[in-house]
Image: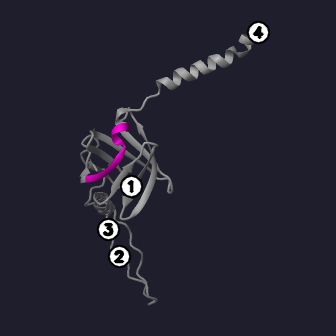
Amino acid sequence: MKITRFLPFYVMMLGILILSSCVTVHPNQKLLIGSWKPESVVKYVDQNTVQAPSATTSTPATAQPVKAKSADTSGKGRAPATPAVPIDQKMALMLDRLIVAEERSTLDISANGTGAKIYHGKVLKAKWKLKAKGTRIVGKELEGGRKFVADIVEISDKRLVVIERTQVGDMKVVYIKQ
């Protein structure tokens, strides 16, 4: 009588035991843990997404410039408006600044699923996970909530090559373990 009463509990515990024994850590996760310093950072253009320009798409020569605010002539100390800059050129400049900042940063990844990137003395803390069978790092900043994605190209004990996807463009980063 007592056995039939506790039988569902025993079956549930057996199921939990089986499921917990199947959980393993991906080998890439073990290699990622540590402190990484960038060796080189370059712009990355994916050849699969590059298309031939058609008559309907805008090229840098025909791109619509960002409108500048009208100049204030009242003499109240406002600066004159800056000239219009094409959006493509503005995105390229932002990517260049991001590449320079990335070259000076340090990436620290810990085993508990958190990490930190140090830019110019500022620490950006984030949670991270491995996705796509250990070939993609997906993270989310703890403070800002911004998401980021990095595709792992190559990983070893001392070297990590990723393609970081950003809103302004992609960059290929080669990290060396410290």
Q: Which residue is mark 4?
A: 1
Front residue of 101/24: it is: 24
Residue 85 circle label: 3
Q: Position of residue 14 (x, y in %)?
A: 58, 18
The answer to which of marks 4 and 3 sits earlier in the sequence is 4
Residue range of the region highlighted in magenta in the rendering: 29-38
SS type, badge 3: loop
**Cα distance in 3D space between marks 2 and 4:** 85 Å
Nearer the observer: mark 2 or 4; the answer is 4
Nearer the observer: mark 4 or 1; the answer is 4
The answer to which of marks 4 and 1 sits earlier in the sequence is 4
Q: Which residue is mark 1?
A: 117
The answer to which of marks 1 and 2 sits earlier in the sequence is 2
Q: Which residue is mark 2?
A: 82
**Cα distance in 3D space between marks 1 and 3:** 31 Å
Q: Crowding near pointer 4: few (<14 within 10 Å), some, many (20+)?
A: few
**Label 2 is placed on what type of residue?**
Thr
